[in-house]
Image (tube, grey):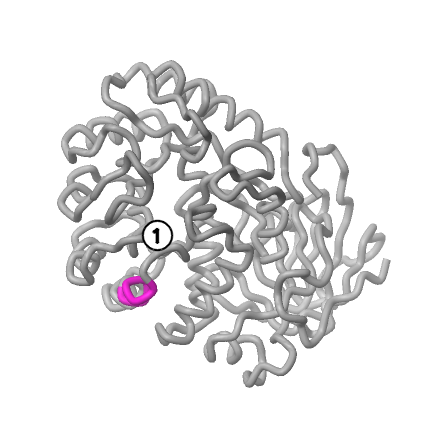
């Protein structure tokens, strides 16, 4: 259910009897712990049950030896207003994606708004409105970081200062507007960075009318913080050029569901070979012409784990902790002080995998048994994933 953000307090929550605890931290992806304690939506303890204070909990969840991981972070979405996408004229896509384990979404621009303003006053107003709206409104409890203006010709440094002072922290995909040249983009990206606004650049062929080809040279010259959908959105650059971007740039390598799957694998493997897997983050780039993908993040994890031959516990970090660190978010990692955002999963019924990690390495997506955001249970057994072999149980 879409809802206005409430002041509901989660109180003290204990998740115990955890079989596999994925941390989201690529330097230590699996934790030797079976219990998590949180208070009012913030993790306070992670460890063995005997070492944690589990008394006087408002909610106790028996994980039944299933896997607990940080809630997934979709690094690349295109919201508009509320839980509606005019791109597909579909209602409830964000809440449905929460049933796919996503607890946080990051806008790469509200570009699908019919009649989207492209004058400077209008684009600034739209970004501020989107930022305010989603700051107050969480469909299905999902945290949507929105308000990402698409830069246009004629913008000056003061415009970026104005946006930052109004609370805007993101730029929409560079290249979806009239600014497409590397030198011009670099100047505006630098202004954005000066005022604490993070930037993402479109990579590859045009995705919608008005966008255009952004090649490797433009990406390198613009030097945006995130190489957006490095595997194309939808049409990719050549594998050689994508690997060159991974090697010559030190910025974030974003791989998305709505891109070229062959190049997605090549980009992830290039990052592993270059010993910079911490730079890889995942998104869906939805909604798009190909539709809405509630399980897009899970499918990307299974794809890179199986066909990419990357350990699934590392790929889970691409979808959680890597993004949290790169985007300075307080979620995505299971450690004290972080947001109590979790997805509880198990291997899908009848998968050939003997456990969750093996099933991912075989290409099967897991079954979700529960999604928790800020310590509040948002859904039980997912209506979108295959049924989990085992599901958690709320004791009280």
Depth order, front residue of 332/243 = 243
Query: For this view, does 291 lie left or right of residue 344?
Result: left
Residue 212 in view: yes
Q: How far from the left and from the top, in percent, is residue 336? A: 60, 51
Q: How many marks?
A: 1
Compared with 111, 310 (above or below) is: below
Q: Is residue 262 magenta?
A: yes
In the rendered view, does 301 fall on the left or right side of 19?
left
**Crowding at label 1, few (<14), some or many (≥20) Cα neighbours within 10 Å?**
many
User: Foreground: 232 or 53?
Assistant: 232
**Residue 22 point in image, percent of width and height:** 55, 65
Is residue 275 at least partly visible in the picture? no
Task: Place residue 117 in its image quadrant.
Answer: top left
Residue pictured at 46% horizontal, 19% vertical: 166
Residue that numbered label 1 is attached to: 254
What residue do we see at 17% from left, 48% from top? Answer: 216
Q: Is residue 278 left or right of residue 242?
A: right
Secondary structure beneath dot 1 equals strand
Quadrant for the C terminus, please: bottom right
Question: What quarter of the picture does the N terminus occupy?
Answer: top right
Q: Is residue 247 above or below residue 104?
A: below
Question: Range of the magenta residues?
Answer: 261-266
Q: What secondary structure characterizes most of the magenta part?
A: helix
At x 65% / y 63%, what residue is drawn?
A: 344
Residue 258: x percent and y percent?
Answer: 39, 55
Residue 295 inside the magenta-drawn segment: no
């Amino acid at each position: 259910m879409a809802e206005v953000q409430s002041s509901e307090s989660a109180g003290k929550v204990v998740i115990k009897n955890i079989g596999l605890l994925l941390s989201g931290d690529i330097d230590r992806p699996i934790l030797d712990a079976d219990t998590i304690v949180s208070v009012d939506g913030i993790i306070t303890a992670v460890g063995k049950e005997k070492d944690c204070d589990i008394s006087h909990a408002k909610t106790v969840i028996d994980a039944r030896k299933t896997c607990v991981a940080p809630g997934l972070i979709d690094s690349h979405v295109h919201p508009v207003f509320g839980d509606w996408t005019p791109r597909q004229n579909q209602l409830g896509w964000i809440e449905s994606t929460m049933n796919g384990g996503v607890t946080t979404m990051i806008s790469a621009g509200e570009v699908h708004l019919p009649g989207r303003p492209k004058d400077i006053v209008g684009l600034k107003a739209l970004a501020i409105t989107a930022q305010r709206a989603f700051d107050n409104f969480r469909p299905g409890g999902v945290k949507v970081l929105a308000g990402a203006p698409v830069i246009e010709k004629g913008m000056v440094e003061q415009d970026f200062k104005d946006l930052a002072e109004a609370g805007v922290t993101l730029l929409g995909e560079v290249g979806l507007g009239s600014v497409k040249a590397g030198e011009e983009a670099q100047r505006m990206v630098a202004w954005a960075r000066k005022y604490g606004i993070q930037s993402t650049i479109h990579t590859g062929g045009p995705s919608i009318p008005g966008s255009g080809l952004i090649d490797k040279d433009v990406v390198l010259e613009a030097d945006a913080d995130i190489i957006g959908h490095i595997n194309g959105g939808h049409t990719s650059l050549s594998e050689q050029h994508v690997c060159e971007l991974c090697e010559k740039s030190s910025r974030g390598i974003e791989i998305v569901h709505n891109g070229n799957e062959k190049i997605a694998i090549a980009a992830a493997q290039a990052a592993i070979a270059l010993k910079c897997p911490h730079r890889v983050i995942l998104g869906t780039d939805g909604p798009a012409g190909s539709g809405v993908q509630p399980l897009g993040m899970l499918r990307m994890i299974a794809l890179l784990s199986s066909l990419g031959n990357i350990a699934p516990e590392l790929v889970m970090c691409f979808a959680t902790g890597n993004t949290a660190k790169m985007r300075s978010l307080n979620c995505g990692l299971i450690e004290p002080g972080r947001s109590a955002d979790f997805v509880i999963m198990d291997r899908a019924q009848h998968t050939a995998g003997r456990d969750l990690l093996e099933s991912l390495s075989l290409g099967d997506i897991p079954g979700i048994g529960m999604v928790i955001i800020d310590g509040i249970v948002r859904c039980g057994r997912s209506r979108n994933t295959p049924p989990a072999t085992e599901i958690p149980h709320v004791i009280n």
